[in-house]
Amino acid sequence: MKNRLIMIFRQKKSVCFPLSGRRLLILLIMFSFVRVSAAGTFPILNNDVSSDAIESTKTMDQQLITGKITDAKGLGIPGAAIIEKGTSNGIVSDVDGNFSISPQGTSPVLVISFVGMITQEIPVSGQTQINVTLAPDFIGIEEVVAVGYGTMKKSDLTGSVYSLTPEKIVDRPVVNVGQALQNKVSGVQVIKQAGGEPGSRPQIRIRGTNSINTNAEPLFVVDGIVGVNNALYNINPNDILSIDVLKDASATAIYGTRGANGVIIIQTKRGVAGDTKVNYSGSVTLSTMLRHNYTVNTDQFMYLYEQAFTNTPKYGTLNLSKDFRGGRGTGDSWSDMPHLFEQVPQGGYFMDLIGNDGKYYKPRFYSDWEDIAFNNALSHDHHIDVSGGTDKAKLSLAVGYTDQDGLLMESYYKRWNIKSTADIKINDWLDLSTDINYVRSDRSRGDDQTRTISETWPLLPTKYPDDDIYGIYAGTWSTGRDFNVGENWRNIAYTMDQRDGYYLDNQFTGGATLNAQITSDLSFKTNFSVDARSLDSRWFNGTFQGTRKSDANGYNQRWFYWQSENYFNYNKTIGDHNFTGLLGLSWSENVYDYVEARAYNFPSDFYQYNNLRAGADTPQAYSSNARSALNSYFARFTYSYLGKYLLTATGRYDGSSKFGANNKYAFFPSIGAGWRISQENFMADSKVVSNLKLRASAGQTGNQEIGSFVTQQYINNTTVMFGNGLASALYPGSTGNDDLKWETTTQIDVGIDLGMFENRISVVLDYYYKVTDDMLFNLPLPASTTSGSAWVNYGQVENKGIEFELATRNFEKKDWSWDTRLTLTANRNKVLKLGPTGADVYVDTGAGNATSVYRIGEPIGTFFGLNRMGVWSTTEAAEAARYGRLPGDLKFEDVNQDGKIELLTDGDVIGNAYPKIFGGLNNSFTYKNFDANILIQFVGGVDKAIVHESAEDRQFVSGMVNRVLDAWRPDHQGPEVMVAQVRAGNAGARYDSYSDTHEIYKAGYIRGQTASIGYTFNDKWGMDRLRVYASFENFFLLTEIELEGYDPEGSSQDKIRSNIPNIDKYQYPNPTNYSLGVNISF
Amino acid sequence: MNYKIKNNIALRFTMFLVIFLIGMSGCENFLEEVPTGNLTTSANLTSKEYGVSFANGAYRRLRDWTGGARDWGNQLPNTLEFPTGGSYTIEPHSQFDKYSTNQVTGDLLDNFNNQWANWYSGVQDCNLAIKMLPTIELTVADFNRYDAEVRTLRAFYYFCIVRYWGDAIMITEPVTNALASEMERTSLKTIYDEIIIPDLESAINRLPAGKSTNGHVTEDVARAILADVYLTVAGYPYQEVATNPTKNWCGEGSWQMQTYPVASGKDFLKKALTQLNALYGKYSLGTYDDLHNPAMNNKGEAIFQVQYSTESGYNNGIMQPSLPLLTKISKSDENGSFTPWVGYYNSYPVGDKRAKERQFFFTWDTNIDNVNDTVWFKDWPHIYKQYVADAVKTVNGSGLNWTHYRYGEILLSLTEVNWALKQLGESVSDNDIVKGINAIRARAELAPFTAGSLTLKDILSERAWELVLENKMLWDQRRTRKCVVYGNNEISAIQDFIGHQPQLFNFAFAPMNLLSPIPGNEIARNGVIEQNFGYLPRN
């Protein structure tokens, strides 16, 4: 404890001494008080009975009440809670559901509750035998859900909150929270951003994208720590007790400036009083690849090669006298390239390749690079937790290990999680809860090798056999230069041999919370937590058989976040009126440090990144530091009358260091109201409607997800080379902005919760409308006058949408049940204002990209490009000539008919990366001890940019996809032909590569996301419970049209844009997984 | 007991309230931003070392001269050679294809964008230094020197800008308001008259005298630039703009004057002569090998060079593009994109030493994997001026400086200026006319010219041969509006720019080709800028 205090003190000292003094004082007061009271020297305290209870014992009329709690089938429910309302007097039903209790009040009311059942309140009214049948709560109306800084019963909510329980999270092997959430919650879009790459980070959007340039990810609150770094993939889903997704302003405004993108509150599992429990979950997963990206094989390649050189003489500066442009290293003829071609008798190959020696040849190698690069992968996952304790001290410890192997050679992800919690009752009014979490993950650092797979010649081997016939190539790795055309393209096995690197993520999160029950109505919580993370990376890039300088680097990124949150909670029922109140304040600070060292020109590949001093060139070093801080005050008030009329008001006054000196603080209010119509008398007896609630809310939230120090006007430094060495230099950096302020999102939400036939059918329907103003916009500025961009508050974005959830319990019989859950989301996004002139903002206009545009009236994620009309036909030669083109060249629509093709002038909107509708359909079945589950994912009204142009129009620069076989020929022309005539070198499409309609695919799909079947043994072999299961992930995929890529979902690694998903420039394939697993409880 | 319990609750509440209230009162500077890794404009920057650093900042962008154009094998020097019609790529390359078919737009990959950003950001670097230097505690001598260095460089960046795009955005101090950063262009004549010429003129006397031995600007450097500036403004487009300075020449593209020399430019020619004479005789011509020998960086005939080294990150980027495509003569990439057109090569006179093997060009080299194996590329001679043996045969990168001005060019300009003055009626001695060009010809082992028979074609031919692939030909075409016609062992003619069709191109030059298109990015971001006549995209 002392150490921690010192740490806090040190941490603060550098920033703000007065505050640290104050904070220290608070903690000292608190801890001294705790010590005093715990030692029992506080004379007025009675240790065992709560003071409220003491008061009430005076008038108690003790009478023992007995009874039995049963379910609808008449089976006793063990472990149900029977509590006398308004007191701490309570008991738990025994193994048969029996209980006995002595009420203490004058007119006691018993509250009987059990997880998954609808709570009942029964006035004792003199009865001594009370038997209760609890009805199942299919829709979780009784669930207590987490809201910011507290919990609420779902029935009391006025906001749009979705709660996910552990059974729904870990019913199959999931590696991260994003996967657990995908298709489970309406309004929440989860995109496997980097396809199937192990350890990659999913993208999550709640109710659309609010902002162009900032991170639109939701805020993660994990065990009270607000904004946990990297929660999305560092948390082990097995550790999660509940996930609550806060969607509307009534729910999120309490998080003020960090609430605009929605909030995901994660509670992890904690110890429970009672017998010590041990749980183990384990699974083994085999990943395979079912979809292919077909490239030409060697014979197709040779055929195209001959075609290309027959076609090429029309063009430019190529040497027309011979096929081969290469030097002697590659030879002038088939006969000069024994490393690639072997002699055959005449007619021994499907085409005649005649060498300079007059003999016949054929290629030696037939490499299928996709086959070489991708392999089935075996992953496994283990998680064990131990928990238990007494009423005074509840403890838990969990250890998890995930070892995920990727389809691509040498790609992996490994993660270790350790977590421990303690909940200690210091005395009858003071509780202490602590959390300690440590995560370490190790991930392969590959660069975009997926492109290499499509663009390596099929006629190359990975490595030449060490045999004399291969001459100087014997025993060496192959590259594109070994054949006589094309780039120095190194095959993937070669590249993997020469490169090595990893990312190592270490994260410690933890904290302590003191909860003081000041009176039965009023409590005070104080929390101090830290989130310390470091990300290390190492990278080595070898000499590639002496063709480049080797280089290596290592960097470390370090974040340290602390928060201190203090708040009062008040809860009072007066008659039919219930009030709750929350008043709190928070301080937090985030410090970031970065250091990197690079070295070049190593004498040997031996050192890799382990000895940077071995590099011969002057090593380079970099470091940087940033800090941001928040200071906030927040309050919430709720009122409910008879549980029918509900009102919630929240407000947060937030100050952030990230904004300009003139705009540090802002206020974010919200209000929500609910009407539980089903509680009204006229509905109470309805046989059809069992639950009906109308909700409406409005409010504002903010967004501050920009970097630190962006309002500053910098003078940057660099080094300049002079004849006598390097000298330091200064030059203008950023164009600052002292007026930069919050981005504000105003949101209204109306929703209806409907339960019918005892809630066997339940519907949740929400409509929302959001407008984001003063958008944090990284305004692109003219390069002529500035360094390129500045953060300004410009622009407006609108999101509106409908969320629909339908849950039905189709069958509920003694031995079997069938549940269906459907979620549907439709979001419409539109840019309303943009920049001072409203000018379009283009992203990635260069060739080989998927260009996108931010344009007023169009949604975020809009693809932009030319209209590819096909290929100029022989009859259009005259028209083609107007563009300097020949028949066989690509034909684009010249929108303004000026005789020039120009991307920005002739281009237009050609697609959108966000779906119009998406959702999931989940069916679960149980039969006796069997359980089964099928989750179908569907996404519609979306486009994907599959930018495989580099393997299509640079035909003899590097390898090619087999679409090229369908290229234009004089005898094969027509509107359906989209690939230019094959020609040597870049002559094919003459790099007429633009972002265009040819690369845009309709990318709607239906995916069999998961199917699982399990069997549970109870009380067998010394185990309380043993469930074995098999699950299949990604077990089918139906796409709207045939796609050239591996998967409709996600982007390739180098095209991951924070707000423009679905750009595939050779994406990592999404595997199909077969898993076997067990869940065991002792 | 009751009393005590209530007291207890009151005490608890009071205690937590006190804690809460203490927490309420924050501290003033908790939300203040204090950047630690970078200086801000509000930092105290008055000490002397900052002065040196600001002055150095002005050199920052010079290194990008041989930087990449975001396309395999295309570097920025290519973009200054392709438009002349004298250079091509061995690989049929889309960018070159667009030049040769007149399909160039402001969005041609990022080529123009990079030049635009590099040169303008050079201007911005200089502007910051010019603003800050007076606030720094410097001796008068130091201030004068740094200020003059920076102004010389700003003049150089602007000189590139106006030659490439014509009218320019005129900024002489840092732009601090993001919302006031969109600006219109100012007449190129104003940029010359108010920035380039006065800055250079005022710099010359404040700079350290003599040669630059390490890349820093000296008096000689400023004189070389100023001489070129005078020679350029004595020609086009300055002299045509001067006929009607208020007309929107670049937007309308109504260029028509084609006579060279221009009579109205005589005064500038005289001023050029003064600067050239000041340099004449101070340097000597070495061997052609010196031109690609890193050991001769800043030595020999070098006057103003961009400084490179073999250090990673400071390499000259044009060497790999100048090697024949994929011939395996080098350890590293061979792009074959910075290559004189074979017709250009064939125009060298019989006996010209420059055209001989391994002088300015080479047609063979040894296989990198086998020194006994000779790789020939006779049909496509490649430029040898960037060939650094150590860099070709290892992976260390070229540390050869890029030459902006060398004595050879000064000699040729001296001849041109003297010749032009004589054409315009000044009395000039025969020796003054031919002394420059004949020194060049002597080194090339060609017969000397006599003043009486010397023609503009001779002068421009000699420049084309001597300065091949030194990024000079585009400027020559534009300032003289004359183009050479490559023949067999001769430059067969000079033609007017407008109407000239390079043999490599499928179109004849029109007035629009006298300027280059403004990058698409700038058009998209700067709502008030006007595109040059004939080009896309437009605002």
Image (cartoon, helix red, strand yellow):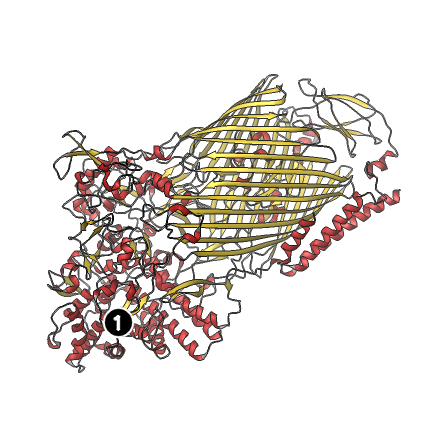
Q: Position of residue A190 (x, y in %)?
A: 50, 38
Towards the viewer: B259 or A23: A23
Q: Where is residue B344 in the image (x, y as percent from the top left)?
A: 17, 59
- The image shows residue B510, relative to residue A915, as above or below, that is below
The residue tagged 1 is B232
Towards the viewer: A183 or A691: A183
In this view, which residue lies farthest toward the bottom?
B427
Q: In the visual, does B349 lie left or right of B254?
A: left
Q: Residues within 10 Å of mark 1 (few under 14, many from 20)?
A: many
Going 28% across and 61% down the picture, which residue do you hit? Answer: B516
**Is residue A369 in view from this perspective?**
yes
* Residue B2 quadrant: top right
* Residue A377 quadrant: top left
Please report, as a chain letter, where disc 1 is located. B
Q: Position of residue A577 (x, y in %)?
A: 75, 39
Towards the viewer: A146 or A317: A317
Going 15% across and 44% down the picture, which residue do you hit? Answer: A322
How many numbered discs sit on the rendered protein? Answer: 1
Disc 1 is placed on an element classified as helix
Q: In the visual, does B65 lie left or right of A136?
A: left
* Residue A728 quadrant: bottom left
- The image shows residue A477, relative to residue A557, as above or below, that is above
Q: Where is residue A12 in the image (x, y as percent from the top left)?
A: 64, 55
For the C terminus of chain A, the quadrant is top right
As shown in the figure, which amino acid type bears the numbered disc 1?
Answer: Thr
Q: In the visual, does A235 lie left or right of B520?
A: right
**Is residue B537 in view from this perspective?**
no
